[in-house]
């Protein structure tokens, strides 16, 4: 019996070790690289990119369609413009590497990114009658803040990978883990947020990840740069660009870059058109933030059914046709003024269900 007891103890010990290993891993990274670095990675990759991009992508689509009421082609064009700050990411990287602000290379850029993100999202969410151009500028500013935070934390990871080579893979794992968990959480709650708060309310919540970026910039531990000669900035820029060009000319660098660029940009993207289709109340399934289809079981009493069939001004109806005893198919949506065109009569297989508007 003694060997069995030893074996059970060994299994229990291994289980406890496996359960504690993620926490030990984070503690080791915090001890070796400082906890403020781990916080910055989790905030930027997990909150700003993971949660922010997933919630922002869903909310922005509904915002352009239901609030600004633009066509799919225009919405796709505007969303392309808001991604412009990510196209010029190398510029933000050069700024963080070449130009320190008040003696720091990373902290001020985190603070700047946080301030830009918070202010732009608050403007977008609090102004109900915001025009297309101001809304476009606000979304572009928020995207710029996220891009600046991204390149700044990437610079921190690269810098720590040089000073702590054994931890380079652990830092990449931390980045990927934070981004994956944040994206999973964001996509899980994005629909609920848009449904309960509307697209502008959901966009306003994106100021929270930006505020966390601002906090990470304030708390980040960084060595101050002393005796920096600002008169030599143009020479430092030239040297950095020359070094970048030398790196890009290496076959090990430019070949994967060309492949990634071609694979990402030569694929047809129909997501914008698909979004307008599945939110269309006539030809699509009508997944809209402005209306919710009431299920038939909520209208079982005769009084409610008669009220629904009689109609009233300002109410939209969905004509549900029963294909069997338990399944209904929504095939058309009509304004209440047009419901007389549908002969409901005494047929129980056809029922008019109101679309209740949140506004």
Image (cartoon, helix red, strand yellow):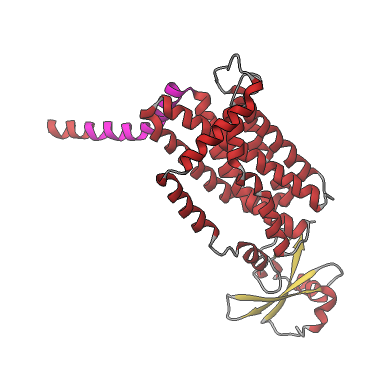
Residue at screen point 70% across, 64% down: 72
> As drawn, is 208 to the left or to the right of 40?
right
Q: Is residue 18 magenta?
A: yes
| Identity of the residue furthest to the right in this view | 313
Residue at screen point 82% across, 45% down: 127
- Where in the figure is residue 218, as x and y percent of width and height? 63, 23
Q: Is residue 231 above or below residue 320?
A: above
Q: Main secondary structure of the magenta part?
A: helix
Name the quadrant containing residue 291: bottom right
- Where in the figure is residue 213, as x and y percent of width and height? 62, 32
Is residue 292 visible in this depiction of the protein?
A: no
Name the quadrant containing residue 114: top right
Is residue 218 visible in this depiction of the protein?
A: yes
Residue at screen point 55% across, 20% down: 222
Q: Is residue 294 magenta?
A: no
Could you say which is closer to the camera, residue 129 or residue 231? Answer: 231
Q: Is residue 8 above or below residue 347?
A: above
Location of the N terminus (image quadrant): top left
- Where in the figure is residue 199, as x and y percent of width and height? 71, 52
> As drawn, is 72 to the left or to the right of 150?
right
| Identity of the residue furthest to the top in this view | 227
Could you say which is closer to the camera, residue 85 or residue 203? Answer: 85
> As drawn, is 38 to the left or to the right of 344?
left
Could you say which is closer to the camera, residue 253 or residue 62? Answer: 253
Location of the C terminus (image quadrant): bottom right
Name the quadrant containing residue 308: bottom right
| Residue span colored magenta | 10-34
How many marks overall? 0
- Where in the figure is residue 132, as x and y percent of width and height? 80, 53
């Amino acid at each position: 019996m003694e060997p069995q007891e030893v074996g059970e103890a060994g299994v229990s010990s291994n289980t406890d070790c496996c359960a504690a290993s993620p926490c030990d891993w984070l503690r080791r990274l915090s001890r070796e690289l400082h906890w403020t670095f781990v916080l910055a990675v989790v905030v930027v990759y997990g909150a700003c990119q993971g949660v922010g991009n997933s919630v922002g992508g869903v909310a922005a689509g509904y915002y352009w369609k239901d609030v600004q009421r633009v066509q799919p082609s225009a919405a796709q064009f505007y969303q392309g413009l808001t991604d412009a700050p990510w196209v010029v990411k190398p510029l933000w990287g050069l700024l963080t590497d070449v130009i320190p602000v008040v003696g720091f290379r990373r902290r001020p850029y985190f603070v700047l990114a946080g301030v830009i993100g918070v202010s732009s999202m608050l403007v977008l969410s609090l102004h109900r009658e915001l025009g297309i151009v101001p809304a476009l500028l606000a979304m572009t500013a928020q995207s710029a803040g996220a891009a600046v935070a991204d390149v700044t934390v990437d610079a921190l990871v690269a810098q720590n990978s040089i000073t702590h080579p054994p931890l380079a893979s652990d830092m990449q794992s931390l980045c990927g883990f934070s981004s994956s968990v944040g994206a999973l959480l964001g996509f899980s709650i994005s629909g609920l947020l848009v449904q309960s708060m509307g697209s502008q309310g959901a966009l306003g919540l994106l100021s929270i990840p930006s505020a966390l970026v601002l906090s990470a910039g304030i708390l980040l531990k960084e060595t101050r740069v002393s005796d920096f000669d600002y008169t030599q900035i143009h020479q430092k820029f030239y040297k950095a660009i020359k070094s970048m060009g030398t790196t890009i000319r290496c076959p090990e660098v430019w070949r994967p870059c060309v492949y990634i660029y071609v694979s990402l940009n030569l694929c047809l993207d129909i997501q914008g058109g698909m979004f307008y289709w599945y939110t269309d109340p006539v030809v699509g399934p009508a997944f809209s933030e402005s209306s919710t289809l009431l299920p038939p079981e909520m209208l079982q009493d005769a009084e409610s059914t008669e009220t629904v069939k009689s109609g009233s001004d300002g109410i939209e109806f969905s004509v549900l046709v029963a294909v069997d005893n338990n399944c209904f198919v929504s095939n058309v949506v009509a304004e209440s003024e047009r419901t007389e065109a549908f002969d409901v009569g005494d047929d129980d297989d056809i029922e008019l269900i109101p679309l209740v508007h949140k506004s």
